[in-house]
Image (cartoon, rainbow, N blue to C red):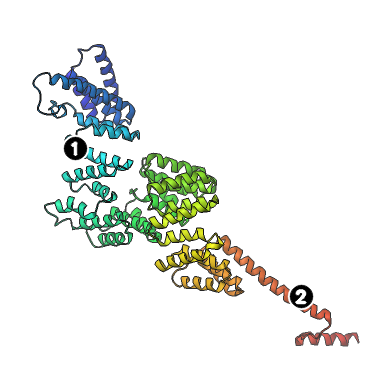
């Protein structure tokens, strides 16, 4: 019968998994009917190979059941071995004469549970492996599971165990940094533990950049990754560029983030990392042709990752008639990767647009819990509270955002937007906006909001001065449109039309610009009509009217003719 077991093994090694399943199923039933058909070790091998084939066919539940049956067979074998002299080693470490490793079987059971999202059971399976027998892959898996459930201390321990054996396990490095382990300590486990670092000077910069990112010092992270990408052997490396783009994005520099992500996609069209954020940025800028192209390209790369589904969701969310499809795509992305914050943000924003405010709130709350450093999560939560007229909760959330995001220009502006809704707190809102602009003089959201506040106070000259100063540094449709509005209110009608014309050149379909032009033209028409009415009134009253020479000559001619 050993020849048949060898045949099963060879079929498995050749990737003929469905053949293995058919043959192993028949052999399993036959051996149950005839106990002498297979020996104990052969039964164990058959079960493991059968489960391996099911695992490769993604039948994880079925595979888990067969793996556990294999362990039961192995347990019987181990007991039979220790009936003689007592071994000096644990049963799992006894040589098994070429049989599949029991440790690998347990690891496969963990993988089955992980794919089924049974994380507690996955942890229990790995914890059943004695600490001294845990290979790096076991420690790595345990560390990520501990991190997922919030058990930080054991996660740190497991990541360190991985680095003790493999100092260049970079995912373990990132794991430690994300758990607030200092960069110097991580460097001691990696770079400083290597015998020769002459050829990997770039690794020091790479580690430093990620250390800055973990400590939320995005400006230094940007500077480090930029120097790494431009002045080393890692020039035009998509991974480094993704890190650079991500830190631009987290710092609120969305324009540069968009440019770098575009460069990443151009260099490596198969790259999926960060493409969900790239899709968000394209949707935000209403660059629909590029977004459509990106979403379909990503979907052709893989349907097993969240990023393609998110990109497709942003594309459909821009189409008011297909928002329900956007919700489906966001949910699909979340099912694939429950840790993907962008999937939550997409679904929350679409639900908010569909006026399902309570459902949107739940998604934004979860996004804030998972990623408190993401400004968009706080913004979505505040917008939902405001829409539901829950101003107190909106103020609390905005205040918390300022604390978490270190009073950044964006968080201060968000707080000010809520304060500005109450006439009693408008002065405080203006103070915050001025503070935001002192930090970031070109932050447009603060400029727009401060101009609106000044306009509500009828301080049109101050609003005009603010917008003119901003236009010296950058030009947007909204800046020109708002300047046109305030000039119109200040009775500078001709200059208002000039500003609207510039705005219309930037966005020919902008409704506010078109409405502004219509208002100015209506005022101008009324002025002209009023002047005509004044002339008619003078004529009817019989008062002297200053006609031009041609009119006078005509009246004389008429008088002479009738006389």
Q: Residues within 10 Å of mark 1 (few under 14, many from 20)?
A: some
The residue depicted at 26 percent of the width and 39 percent of the height is 142
Name which of mark 1 and mark 2 comes first in the sequence: 1
Q: Quadrant of residue 87?
A: top left
Q: Nearer the viewer, residue 547 or 123?
A: 123
Quarter of the image with the C terminus in it: bottom right
Q: Residues within 10 Å of mark 2 (few under 14, many from 20)?
A: few
Percent x, y for residue 123? 28, 35
Q: State the SS at label 1.
A: loop
Is the residue under label 2 in contact with that under label 1 (CB below 8 Å)? no
The residue depicted at 51 percent of the width and 74 percent of the height is 465
Q: Mark 1 points at which residue?
A: 135
Q: Residue furthest front?
A: 424
Q: Name the residue under label 2.
A: 533
Q: In which quarter of the image is residue 244?
A: bottom left
Q: Separation of disc 1 and disc 2 at Cα?
A: 95 Å
Q: 164 left or right of 382?
A: left
Q: 243 left or right of 200?
A: right
Position of residue 78 relative to residue 360, above or below, is above
């Amino acid at each position: 019968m050993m020849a048949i077991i060898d045949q099963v093994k060879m079929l498995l090694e050749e990737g003929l998994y469905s053949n293995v399943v058919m043959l192993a199923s028949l052999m399993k039933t036959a051996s149950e009917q005839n106990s002498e058909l297979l020996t104990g070790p052969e039964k164990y091998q058959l079960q493991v190979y059968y489960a391996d084939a099911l695992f490769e066919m993604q039948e994880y539940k079925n595979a888990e059941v067969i793996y556990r049956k294999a362990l039961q067979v192995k347990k019987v074998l181990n007991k039979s071995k220790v009936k003689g002299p007592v071994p000096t080693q644990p049963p799992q470490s006894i040589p098994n004469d070429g049989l599949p490793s029991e440790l690998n079987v347990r690891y496969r059971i963990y993988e089955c549970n992980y794919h089924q999202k049974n994380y507690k059971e996955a942890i229990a399976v790995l914890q059943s492996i004695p600490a001294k027998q845990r290979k790096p892959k076991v420690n790595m898996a345990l560390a990520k599971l501990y991190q997922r459930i919030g058990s930080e201390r054991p996660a740190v321990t497991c990541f360190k165990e991985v680095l003790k054996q493999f100092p260049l396990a970079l995912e373990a490095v990132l794991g430690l940094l994300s758990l607030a382990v200092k960069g110097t300590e991580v460097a001691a486990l990696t770079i400083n533990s290597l015998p020769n670092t002459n050829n990997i000077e770039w690794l020091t910069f790479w580690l430093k950049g990620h250390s800055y990112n973990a400590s939320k010092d995005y400006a230094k992270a940007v500077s480090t990754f930029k120097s790494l990408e431009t002045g080393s052997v890692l020039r035009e490396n998509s991974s480094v560029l993704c890190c650079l783009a991500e830190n631009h994005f987290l710092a609120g520099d969305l324009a540069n983030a968009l440019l770098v992500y575009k460069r990443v996609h151009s260099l490596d069209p198969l790259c999926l990392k960060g493409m969900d954020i790239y899709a968000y940025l394209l949707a935000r800028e209403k660059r629909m042709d590029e977004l459509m192209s990106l979403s379909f390209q990503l979907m052709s790369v893989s349907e097993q990752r969240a990023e393609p589904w998110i990109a497709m969701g942003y594309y459909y969310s821009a189409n008011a008639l297909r928002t329900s499809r956007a919700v489906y795509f966001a949910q699909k992305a979340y099912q694939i990767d429950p840790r993907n914050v962008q999937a939550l943000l997409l679904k929350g924003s679409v639900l908010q647009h569909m006026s399902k405010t309570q459902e949107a709130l739940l998604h934004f709350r979860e996004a804030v819990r998972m990623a408190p450093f993401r400004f968009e999560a706080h913004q979505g939560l505040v917008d939902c509270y405001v829409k539901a007229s829950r101003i107190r909760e909106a103020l609390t959330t905005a205040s918390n955002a300022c604390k978490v995001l270190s009073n950044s220009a964006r968080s201060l502006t968000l707080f000010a937007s809520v304060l500005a809704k109450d006439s009693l707190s408008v002065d405080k809102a203006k103070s915050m906006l001025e503070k935001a602009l002192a930090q970031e003089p070109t932050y447009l959201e603060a400029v727009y909001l401060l101009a609106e506040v000044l306009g509500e106070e009828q301080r049109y000259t101050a609003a005009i001065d603010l917008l003119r100063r901003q236009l010296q540094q950058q030009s947007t449709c909204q800046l020109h449109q708002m300047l046109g509005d305030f000039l119109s209110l200040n009775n500078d009608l001709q200059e208002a039309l000039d500003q609207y014309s510039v705005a219309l050149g930037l966005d020919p379909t902008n409704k506010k610009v078109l409405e502004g032009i219509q208002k100015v033209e209506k005022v101008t028409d009324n002025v002209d009509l009023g002047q005509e009415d004044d002339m008619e009134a003078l004529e009817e009253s019989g008062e002297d009217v200053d006609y031009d020479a041609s009119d006078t000559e005509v009246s004389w001619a008429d008088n002479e003719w009738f006389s």
